[in-house]
Amino acid sequence: MLFKQEALAGIRTGKVTLAFRCWRAAAVRSGGQQVTPVGMIAFGDVRRVTPGDISLADAQAAGYESKSALLKALEGRAGEIWRIEVSFAGDDPRIGLRENTDMSLQHIAARLDRFDRAAEQPWTRTVLALIASRPGVRAAELAAGLGEERARFKRRVRNLNALGLTLSLQTGYQLSPRGKAYLDALDRLANRSSTP
């Protein structure tokens, strides 16, 4: 579920407690959470409503000045109107991971091996090294260099973000301190095994 920066700021401060979307079926569920640029957002009650069900207070809780402004924002969108309770659920847990360089190399390697098996190639280590050598380069350019489709590349890098190994920049990515420590550990292991 996408949010404008203004809405995210409002959710973080508690000023925005509702969101309205037009969907054919609910795209989030009650009790679910989502990582956003401002941290974790929790979803409360999620239900279909009609324009008549929406009050001025609902519109204002969603960050709109009036009910008509909210309905205008939804105008022309396919699907039914869904009312979603939203709240700030805490900081992005990946932030702590990114700074944590005290890690089990085996644990990270096991997780990355699972990603590689799903991709049917040793993808993750190649991409970590690529991001290390080309920080801030657009995802489309990195994907093209690997002969990969951009959307698929970005989905896979989100797995690396979730492990705290990389972080997304305004343009492109860079390794986190955790990601650098992981690659350094791999290099040390490789050097040890190649030393007679």
Image: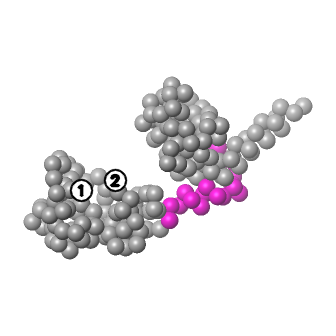
Mark yes or no: residue 125 visible: no
Q: Residues within 10 Å of mark 2 (few under 14, many from 20)?
A: few
Residue type beneath disc 2: Met
- Describe residue 141's horizontal placement relative to residue 19 as left or right: right
Q: Which residues are magenta?
A: 91-111
Q: Position of residue 38 (x, y in %)?
A: 45, 62
Cα separation, mark 1 vs mark 2, equals 9 Å
Q: Quadrant of the C terminus?
A: top right
* Name of the residue lying farthest toward the left: 52
Q: Which mark is residue 41?
A: none
Mark yes or no: residue 16 visible: yes
Q: Secondary structure at mark 2?
A: loop
Which residue is pictured at 51% across the width and 38% down the height? 138
Which residue carries the number 1 mark? 21
Q: Secondary structure at mark 1?
A: strand
| Residue 162 located within the stretch drawn in magenta | no
| Residue 93 located within the stretch drawn in magenta | yes
Query: Contact, CB < 8 Å: mark 1 with mark 2?
Result: yes
Residues 103 and 76: in front is 76
Residue type beneath disc 1: Arg
Q: Quadrant of residue 113?
A: top right
